[in-house]
Image (cartoon, rainbow, N blue to C red):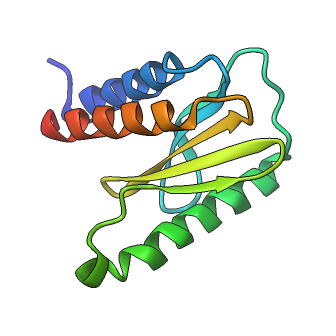
């Protein structure tokens, strides 16, 4: 009989794999814990990271901090659905997910609206099945 943590890990892996199928220009999909560590997911095969491991972890910690900062206004504005940072080479989308965050990095050619909408739908469905 599988443990709950095994099922949760499989669900998280499936979620990351599903998000990659939304758009071929998605570079990275990962679930990040409170320490800024990627606990599931990673880069699409054949994609080279633009940052080294320390820079990546620093970026994820900042993404966590940004989500937490804006969640502190949830009582007045409502809960945070996602944050988007668009730069010349990439766009980073960050979604709160349980006690973690889901990070998606895309090339500038991506259909951001579609990625956002389909990711929000998948996260809602995933929360209903936890």
Quadrant the C terminus occupies: top left
Residue 112, how many percent across, how many down?
56, 37
Of residue 77 and residue 53, the one placed in the foreground of this image is 77
Of residue 18 and residue 52, the one placed in the foreground of this image is 18
Above or below for 21 versus 79: above
Residue drawn where x is 72% and y is 62% of the image:
58
Residue drawn where x is 14% and y is 33% of the image:
129
- The part of the image, by quadrant, that contains residue 106 is top right
Of residue 88 and residue 26, the one placed in the foreground of this image is 88
- The part of the image, by quadrant, that contains residue 59 is bottom right
Residue drawn where x is 77% and y is 52% of the image:
87
Report the side of 83 relative to 56 (left or right): left
Residue 30, how many percent across, how many down?
54, 38
Residue drawn where x is 38% and y is 27% of the image:
15
Residue 78, how many percent across, how many down?
26, 71
Q: How many marks?
A: 0
Residue 68, how many percent across, how many down?
44, 73
Above or below for 31 versus 122: below
Report the side of 125 relative to 72 (left or right): left
Quadrant the N terminus occupies: top left
């Amino acid at each position: 009989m599988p443990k709950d943590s095994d099922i949760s890990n499989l669900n998280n892996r499936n979620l990351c794999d599903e998000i990659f199928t939304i758009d071929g220009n998605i570079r990275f999909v990962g679930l990040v814990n409170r320490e800024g560590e990627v606990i599931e997911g990673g880069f699409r095969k054949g994609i080279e990271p633009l940052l080294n491991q320390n820079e990546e972890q620093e970026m994820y910690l900042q993404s966590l901090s940004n989500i937490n900062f804006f969640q502190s206004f949830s009582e007045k504005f409502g809960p945070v659905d996602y944050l988007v940072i668009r730069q010349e080479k990439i766009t980073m989308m960050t979604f709160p997910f349980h006690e973690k965050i889901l990070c998606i990095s895309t090339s500038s050619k991506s259909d951001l609206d579609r990625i956002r909408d389909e990711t929000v739908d998948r996260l809602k469905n995933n929360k209903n099945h936890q």
